Image: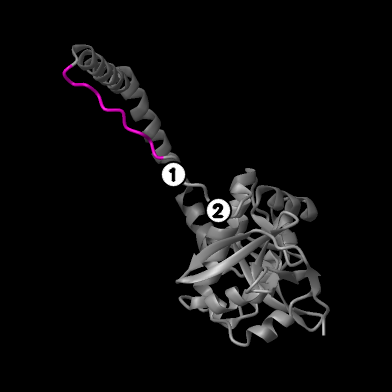
């Protein structure tokens, strides 16, 4: 049985709510830790005690929350990801575990990274100052302000005849370019829809990039997250199809492995302003 690190201090608790379930989050050394029992209950995971014990030692710890909670088991962000990805329910669209995974990855974790905090401070409510409409000076100021806004609008709408002619010519030229490029675009789109999955290294080669530098660039952009010793894509990039995550076995344990789709390679080709050399990539891994 793996040892559990005990953290004696009672850290501050933040509460997130999912489907009428409270998810307690504590900060330890500047990182978020989730109360494991809360996660399992909200996501409706079966055998929570077995699932939590299966996590690696550095993904879980026991902390003292004080009376009446006493010691509770908390898990890291990587442990949360591992716990959910090991559950088949988290991969079934519409299931509670699936909705919980999307809520945690798309709302809770991005908000924590953006604000470096566990609670969103409410925006201050503006205090309305009543205007004395019987005061001629107030009415004159309001009238002048409205006239200024209308004058600015008129200036933005003024377009000379020559500008209209130039714009029309540019649109015509652009339409011709689109028509000439349409067969090539349709060919590429059909290819992107029909191909399988590529490793991150193969995707980098197809884009003429050194694989390790390409992966480092994806991490700098925040498209890849270092979770559970794996470079895993953000949930929104999985939903939009540039990436897929496959569960593969390493050392007798399941591990989430990122893969790039053909659509994703084309997407990053546009981002890098480079053409795609499909021959430079290895043969894709076909879908199961």
What residue appears at the point 53 percent right and 63 percent down from the top-left corner? 16
- CB atoms of marks 1 and 2 within 8 Å: no
Q: Secondary structure at mark 2?
A: loop
The residue lying toward the viewer, choosing from 103 and 193, is: 103
Rendered location of residue 242, percent (x, y): 58, 60
Residue at image location 64% in from the left, 67% down from the top: 34
View extreme (left): residue? 134
Q: Position of residue 185 (x, y in %)?
A: 50, 53
Q: Using the image, tell me which numbered label, if any, was put on residue 263.
A: none
**Residue 18: image location, x then y, percent:** 49, 68
Q: Which residue is mark 2?
A: 119
- The secondary structure that most of the magenta stretch takes on is loop
Q: Position of residue 159 (x, y in %)?
A: 30, 20
Disc 2 residue crowd, few under 14, some 14–19, many 20+, Cα 10 Å: few
Relative depth, front residue between 147 and 49: 49
Q: Nearer the viewer, residue 255 or 174?
A: 255
| Image point (32%, 32%), residue name | 128
Q: Which residues are magenta?
A: 125-134
Tell me the CA gap for discs 1 and 2: 48 Å
Task: Name the quadrant of the C terminus.
Answer: bottom right
Is residue 129 magenta-colored? yes
Q: Is residue 267 above or below residue 47?
A: above
The residue drawn where x is 72% and y is 55% is 204
The stretch drawn in magenta includes residue 90: no
Which residue has dot 1 on it? 178
């Amino acid at each position: 049985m793996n040892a559990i690190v005990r953290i004696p201090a009672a850290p501050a608790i933040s509460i997130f709510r999912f489907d009428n379930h409270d998810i307690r989050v504590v900060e330890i050394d500047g990182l978020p830790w989730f109360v494991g029992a809360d996660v399992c209950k909200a996501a409706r995971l079966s055998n929570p005690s077995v699932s939590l014990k299966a996590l690696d030692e550095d993904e879980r710890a026991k902390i003292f929350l004080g009376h009446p909670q006493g010691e509770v088991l908390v898990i890291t962000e990587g442990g949360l990801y591992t716990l959910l990805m090991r559950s088949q329910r988290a991969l079934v669209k519409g299931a509670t575990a699936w909705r919980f995974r999307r809520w945690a990855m798309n709302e809770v974790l991005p908000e924590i990274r953006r604000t470096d905090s566990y609670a969103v401070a409410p925006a201050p409510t503006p205090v309305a100052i009543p205007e004395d409409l019987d005061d001629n000076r107030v009415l004159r100021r309001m009238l002048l302000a409205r006239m200024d806004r209308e004058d600015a609008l008129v200036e933005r709408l003024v377009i000379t005849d020559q500008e209209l002619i130039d714009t029309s010519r540019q649109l015509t030229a652009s339409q011709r370019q689109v028509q000439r490029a349409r067969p090539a675009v349709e060919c590429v789109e059909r290819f992107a829809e029909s191909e399988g999955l590529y490793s991150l290294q193969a995707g980098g080669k197809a884009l003429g990039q050194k694989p390790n530098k390409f992966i480092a660039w994806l991490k700098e952009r925040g498209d890849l997250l270092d979770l559970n010793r794996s470079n895993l894509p953000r949930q929104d990039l999985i939903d939009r199809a540039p990436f897929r995550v496959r569960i593969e076995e390493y050392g007798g344990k399941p591990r989430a492995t990122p893969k790039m789709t053909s659509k994703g390679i084309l997407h990053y080709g546009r981002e890098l302003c480079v053409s795609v050399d499909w021959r430079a990539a290895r043969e894709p891994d076909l879908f199961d």
